[in-house]
Amino acid sequence: MPDTIADSLTGTAGKWLAEFEAAINSSDPASVENLFHGDSHWRDLVALTWRIQTISGADGIAASLTPSADAVKPSGFEIDPNRAPPRRVTRAEREVLEAIIRFETTQGRASGVLRLIDDDHDKPRAWTLLTALEEIKGFEESVGKKRPSGKSYSRDFKGPNWLDQRQSTVAFEDRDPAVLISGGGQAGLSIAARLTHLGIDTLVVDRGKRIGDNWRNRYHALTLHNQVHVNHLPYMPFPPNWPAYIPKDKVAGWFEAYAESLELNVWSETEFTGGSYDDQKGEWSVGLRRADGTTREMHPRHVIMATGVSGIPNLPDIPSLKEFGGKVIHSSEYSDASDWAEAKVIIVGTGNSAHDIAQDLTSHGAAAVTMVQRSPTTIVDVEPSAQLPYALYDEGPSLEDCDLIAASAVYQLMKKTHQMFTQQTKEIDKELHAGLARIGFKMDFGEDDTGWQFKYLERGGGYYFNVGCSDMLIDGRVGLIQFDDIDAFVAEGVRMNSSETLKADLIVLATGFKGQNYLNRKLFGDGIADRVGGVWGFDREAQELRNMWTRTPQPGLWFHAGSFAQCRIYSKYLALQIKAVEEGLIG
């Protein structure tokens, strides 16, 4: 008899894994199907299929998993003794036995997350199963005991030292990189770090003068809106004394130190001007423009777009706006409230940037600040409501374990969980919401009440984490008008339908950014853009974000974006796919 509850849970999960391994090795879909609940989900992160994909339903899982297992021969399924032990938890209102597992295939070492539920049968069945590749056999990362020896510069006193070698490597004077990454933010740096540690020659290009300028040059008061413990980058966690909410300049400085410490090859002040793909050669011809005006054509085998899901300012077509006699800027151009002390400002938009800019201006003495609402916005207090989706990271397991558990949340589970968070938020923030409703602020809670994070995953915006501006709206320190109540923009400001004129010196367009689809068409042309299709936003049938972190219909073109946590988690699986292509393991 088991001595403890933990032993019992380990035994239950271990027995299921043994039956599962026997079933897939028998190549019998019926045996596999019998181990899964009817409403079950299998998510593979390139461990068995070399793709990021989700399959639902016991019959669908059996039909897809059996041939995949035949191809890569997974074996050695067991509870991972080095990670959080199996435990009873509640996920999406369902009590489950959750266990972190490990196994091997002919090509790699893998891990996963198994969730078992009790049903009407005489044994637990799988509700969700994650299979995730950790490393490719023979091509492990150069970390720990596999770190570089340093002999090439530490033993030859006549040869080039470390700095000489780094400068030569970064210059790319006599070679092209295997991978070119456009964008040096958290997406570009995280995937560059992963590829570098897999021995893949990689170059990051960024338009900023310095790495980190994508944060450094934003408005003065900006800080991250989620907490430090979920925002680490791969290999180098933030120091333990850092504040819970990191200031933008601290993030910028860390990016610069990160690139230097991990020896990432970066060209700053370099614009990626576009490219074309040669199907016969299997390589790109891409153009780069340097700060001094010189150009360089390179021929990488892979291009990774890491410019974010919202890199190009979206400027709405407001015909009368050209009549305004003051200054008009996009929110990306806004930097310092002191430049507009005692000014009257109108901000078009009610998302995070609009609220933060309004609060910044009001706090620095602007004479009047008015927000213009064009569509309903999801509003949650930054604490605790906005942090609810990160509750997993406070449950006790390590960051590595939490990342794996987070990756195991298939679309249907995520949707249900975020609907629960939304209901909690409505109760926690009911006084805030009532105050906003009184002043006519239009709110929603996302499609099917899935809340702010699903809005981010679908469209990259449409929400605000209240750090004080909602309170300013409610008490009247910041004004609010609806776009539909505007007759026209005029020289003095805004003329309302009531004929009243709201005067302004500055109009800030906090209207968001164009998506990756627009940029693809601009850089690669209609043919490639049409072939790739949509990027970001859920494909409901596939239950995955479209074309993210996985092979796309365009060979050699990859996309990496998202929050710090998404970039940290999925950079691993993107890098492993590129390594597999480079080594001829997949096409």
Image (cartoon, grey):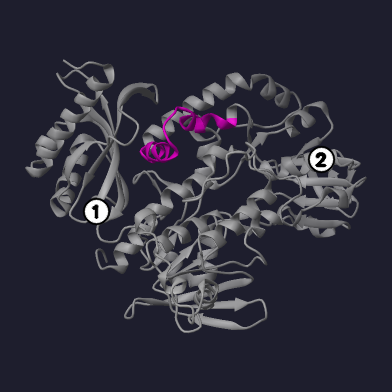
Depth check: 9 or 415 in front?
Answer: 9
Residue 450 in view in this figure = no
Image: magenta residue range: 386-410
* Residue 293 in the figure: left or right of residue 236: right
Q: Secondary structure at mark 2?
A: strand
Q: Is 569 above or below relative to 423? A: below
- Residue at image x 68%, y 19%? 431
Q: Is residue 39 above or below residue 200?
A: above
In magenta stretch: residue 404 = yes
Image point (66%, 81%), residue name: 293
x 44%, y 28%: residue:
396
Q: Check disc 1 and give the amino acid type.
A: Gly
Residue linked to disc 2:
370
Front-most of residues 210 and 236 = 236
Q: Secondary structure at mark 1?
A: strand
Q: Residues within 10 Å of mark 2 (few under 14, many from 20)?
A: many
In the rendered image, the quadrant that contains the N terminus is top left
Q: Main secondary structure of the magenta part?
A: helix
Q: Position of residue 561 (x, y in %)?
A: 50, 53
283 sits to left or right of 329: left
Dividing the picture into quarters, in which one does residue 113 lie? top left
Left or right, residue 273 beside residue 115: right
| Circle number at residue 108 | 1
Q: Position of residue 516 (x, y in %)?
A: 52, 59
Q: Please name which of the two marks, 1 or 2, marks the residue nearer to the observer.
A: 1
Q: Say if the magenta span includes residue 144.
A: no
